[in-house]
Image: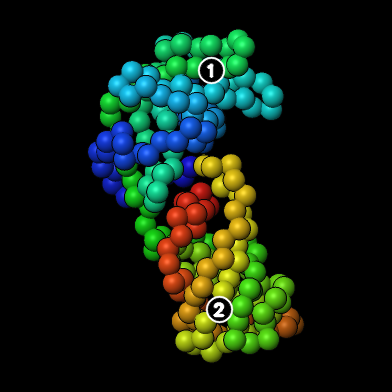
Amino acid sequence: MSQAENAPQAAKFSDMDLRVGQRVQLVIHAPVLQKHYTSLIGYVENEFLMLRVPQEDGWIAHLKEGMNVEVRLFSGVSVFTFPTRVDTLLLNPRNYMLMRFPDQIQEVRMRAHARVRTNKPVEIVEASSAATKATGFHLHDLSGGGASVLGPAPLGPVGARVRLGFRFKLEATNLNEHVELNATIQSADPVVNEGRPTAYQHGVQFDVVDPRILLWVHELQ
């Protein structure tokens, strides 16, 4: 995960809303920075967390009992981080590990207006013009609240409604997402490139802030 944007604030364990199977990231700071993804098996509050031992390319990650690690996870519209320690490794038969229960948890809420440049494709599900279902559209930039969409045809005038589709994989959840969002066109301008067909750039504002888009922006930074 990328570096958090906002100042972290203290959080309670219950704020994380942990679920069995939830994907988390382990960060090992010494001697060489390592990052591994794994999943939550369960926990006993105020006693321990149980995680799967992470694997990379079929090999078990190099972890030792007593090793200090940092756990990062995404829940709601926040990224949570806390230090912990590998108390027990149970490599046989199922590769479990018991971690110290967290007592200092930091929360960073992701901002809807944080914007990132990207060239990811976007689907035109509905539009007021003939561009519906047309191909060749991509994102020029993206935020949780809106996007700049560049493509070979106009989507409609300022104020017109569109429905956009996004397909992406989130590292934080290991899920392939397909998100469709309704939006309003805020700007629509032709872009003339010498020797190339005219393109059209649209600024759109989403009707709602989708947490999956927020996390995607966070990971693209």
Type of amino acid at the residue the image marks with label 1: Tyr
Q: Badge 2 is on which residue?
A: 162
Residue 190 in view, yes or no: no
Q: Which residue lies most toward the bottom here?
A: 157
Where is residue 86 shown, x and y percent of the image? Answer: 44, 16
Q: CA distance from mark 2 to mark 1?
A: 47 Å
Q: Is residue 29 above or below residue 111?
A: above
Q: Residue at x 51, y 49 (%)?
A: 219
Q: Nearer the viewer, residue 206 or 198?
A: 206
Q: Measured from the top left, where is residue 62 in percent x and y?
A: 56, 17
Task: State left or right for residue 111 relative to residue 21.
Answer: left
Q: Is residue 85 left or right of residue 116?
A: left
Q: For the residue labelled by badge 1, is the local secondary structure a helix, a strand or a loop?
A: strand
Q: Which residue is mark 1?
A: 96
Residue 169 in percent (x, y) is at: 61, 49
* Structural crowding at the residue carrying mark 1, measured as other residues with C-alpha within 10 Å and reported as few (<14), some (14–19) or many (≥20): some
The earlier-in-sequence mark between 2 and 1 is: 1
Q: Tell me the kind of residue under disc 2.
A: Val
